[in-house]
Every structure is written in C-alpha cells, then in structure tokens.
Image (spheres, helix red, strand yellow):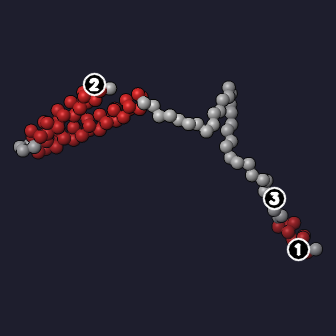
C-alpha cells in the first residue's frame, strides 16, 4: 500500500512541477498541467481510501438476520390494533332517525 501511495504521489508531482515551470511564460499550459495534477491527486485520494477500506474493513452490527432458502417476506412494522369500522352514510341516517 505504501508503494502505491508513493507511486501516485510521484504521478501527481510530475504535472505539478511542469505547471510551475510554465507559470511565468505559458499560462494556458500551466493551467492545463495544474488541472491534470489535481485530477491525479483526487484519483490518488480515492485509491488510498479504497485500499484502506479493504485493509481495515468496518464492523457492521446487524439488528436482524434473515436466513431462508426460498422466497421470503420481511415485515418489520409494529403490530397495531385493528381500526374500528366507521358507519356509512345510510347507517348514520338510520341511527339519527331513531
């Protein structure tokens, strides 16, 4: 992992140095080299993060383990009491008229 980090650092330094050399006379070339150097630096960062994640994986604490050998349905909702039936318009009129 350290060798890869040093290699990517060297790849970043080359365009950065070329940008510094072109800064005084060729501003568009210096800008192009600096953009390339920053892209390489970003790629270096993501590569090192990936290598670190592979070498040191995060620990996952699962709340639930679903073990089945076929189709399964997982329902994690809490169970509620059934709702009471409401009276329709006709039923409500009958009770009012009595």
- Residue displayed at 90% across by 70% down: 94
Q: In this orientation, which residue lies closer to the viewer: 43 or 33?
A: 43
Mark 2 vs mark 3: which is more N-terminal? 2
Foreground: disc 1 or disc 2:
2
Crowd tier of the residue under label 2, counting other residues whose Cα lies within 10 Å: few below 14, some 14–19, many 20 or above? few
Q: In this orientation, which residue lies closer to the viewer: 60 or 79?
A: 60
Mark 3 — residue?
A: 84
Mark 1 vs mark 2: which is more N-terminal? 2
Quarter of the rendering containing residue 29: top left
Q: Is residue 84 above or below residue 68?
A: below
Q: Which mark is residue 56?
A: none
Q: Which mark is residue 3?
A: 2
Q: Secondary structure at mark 1?
A: helix
- Residue displayed at 85% across by 69% down: 92
Q: Secondary structure at mark 2?
A: helix
Mark 1 — residue?
A: 96
**Is residue 29 in sight in this rendering?**
no
Mark 3 vs mark 1: which is more N-terminal? 3
Q: Position of residue 49 (x, y in %)?
A: 36, 34
Give how far apart the Cα atoms at labels 2 and 3 are. 69 Å
Crowd tier of the residue under label 1, counting other residues whose Cα lies within 10 Å: few below 14, some 14–19, many 20 or above? few
Q: Position of residue 15 (x, y in %)?
A: 17, 35
Quarter of the rendering containing residue 41: top left
- Residue displayed at 68% across by 31% down: 71
Q: Are marks 3 and 1 in contact (CB under 8 Å)?
A: no
| 11 relative position to 62: left or right | left
């Amino acid at each position: 992992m350290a060798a890869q980090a040093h290699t990517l650092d060297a790849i970043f330094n080359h365009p950065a140095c070329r940008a510094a050399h072109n800064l005084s006379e060729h501003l568009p070339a210096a800008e192009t080299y600096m953009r390339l150097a920053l892209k390489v630096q970003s790629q270096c960062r993501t590569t090192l993060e990936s290598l670190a994640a592979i070498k040191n994986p995060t620990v996952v604490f699962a709340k639930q383990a679903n073990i089945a050998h076929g189709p399964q349905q997982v329902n994690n909702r809490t169970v509620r009491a059934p709702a009471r039936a409401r009276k329709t318009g006709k039923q409500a009129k009958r009770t009012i008229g009595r």
